[in-house]
């Protein structure tokens, strides 16, 4: 029987540093790690439905809202399939809908899943956004230092905040975050967040 692949879910707001942590995991962890998540999903989503699962809080009227639940279901079923095939998976997402999050968690129950909250203070998020190339991310202005969509992400992405590990990327580098995850995976303590999240919607 093929051993189940490890799954690491990185949940946090855009520009919190999830993708950088995922890259370090792929490059430095033992075995093959497949990167699934918001960036991969966006690339597969028709343009008129983008950003797909990256839909921001408060955008319920966006065309993508019609298919977001199906996109999440397909993504998490794919994550489960990869794990059952013996492949390790790292996933970077930004959940802000408790009902969808619980449904996603139920699709992974019974698999080795480690859920990580990737936190970053709003000031650091805005500094990263403002330093990005113009037009790539919503940036602050003198009139609106923090765009409303960014504030909504910050307020909603860590609700209900059920994690196996929480990391602050304003004080830890991507390599340090990945190392903290590696140590926790190696310590053998059972991860329970995915089961608790699944029960929230039961």
Image (cartoon, helix red, strand yellow):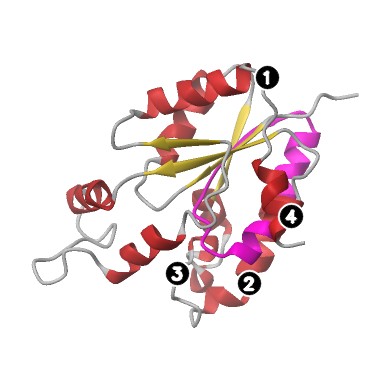
Nearer-the-camera pick, 37 or 96: 96
* Disc number placed over residue 67 in the picture, else none: 2
14 horizontally vs 129: left or right = right
Q: Is residue 74 visible?
A: no
Question: Where's residue 44, x and y in %?
Answer: 57, 57
Q: Nearer the viewer, mark 2 or mark 1?
A: 1
Q: Are marks 1 and 4 in contact (CB under 8 Å)?
A: no
Indicate which disc, 2 or 1, sits on the residue closer to the N terminus: 2
Q: Nearer the viewer, mark 4 or mark 2?
A: 4
Residues at marks 2 and 1, CA–CA distance in whole angstroms: 38 Å
Residue lying at 34% horizontally and 44% vertically, measured from the top left: 120
Residue lying at 56% horizontally and 75% vertically, measured from the top left: 65
155 horizontally vs 73: left or right = left
Indicate which disc, 2 or 3, sits on the residue closer to the N terminus: 3
Indicate which disc, 1 or 3, sits on the residue closer to the N terminus: 3
Q: Are marks 1 and 3 in contact (CB under 8 Å)?
A: no
Question: Where's residue 39, x and y in %?
Answer: 49, 50
Residues at marks 1 and 4, CA–CA distance in whole angstroms: 23 Å
Q: Secondary structure at mark 2?
A: loop
Q: Which stretch appears magenta?
A: 76-102
The residue pinned by badge 3 equals 57
Q: Residues within 10 Å of mark 2 (few under 14, many from 20)?
A: few
Residue furthest right in the image? 1
Q: Are marks 4 and 2 in contact (CB under 8 Å)?
A: no
Indicate which disc, 1 or 4, sits on the residue closer to the N terminus: 1
Q: Nearer the viewer, mark 2 or mark 3?
A: 3
* Disc number placed over residue 150 in the picture, else none: none
* Disc number placed over residue 188 in the picture, else none: 1
Q: Nearer the viewer, mark 1 or mark 3?
A: 1
Q: Is residue 149 visible?
A: yes
Q: Are marks 2 and 3 in contact (CB under 8 Å)?
A: no
The residue pinned by badge 4 equals 199
């Amino acid at each position: 029987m093929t051993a189940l692949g490890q799954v690491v879910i990185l949940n946090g707001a855009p520009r919190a540093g999830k993708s950088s942590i995922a890259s370090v995991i792929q490059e430095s962890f033992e075995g093959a790690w497949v990167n699934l998540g918001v960036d991969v999903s966006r690339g597969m989503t028709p343009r008129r439905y983008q950003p797909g699962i990256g839909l921001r809080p408060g955008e319920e009227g966006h065309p993508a809202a019609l298919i977001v639940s199906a996109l999440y279901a397909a993504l998490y079923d794919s994550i489960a399939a990869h794990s059952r095939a013996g492949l390790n998976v790292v996933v970077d997402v930004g959940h802000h809908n408790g009902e969808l999050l619980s449904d996603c968690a139920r699709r992974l129950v019974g698999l080795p899943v480690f859920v990580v909250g990737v936190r970053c203070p709003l000031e650091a998020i805005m500094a990263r956004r403002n330093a990005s190339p113009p037009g790539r991310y919503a940036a602050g202005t003198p009139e609106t230092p923090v765009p409303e969509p960014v504030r909504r992400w910050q307020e909603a992405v860590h609700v209900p905040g059920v994690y196996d590990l929480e990391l602050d990327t304003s004080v830890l580098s991507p390599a340090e975050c990945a190392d903290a995850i590696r140590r926790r995976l190696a310590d053998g303590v059972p991860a329970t967040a995915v089961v608790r999240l699944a029960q929230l919607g039961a």
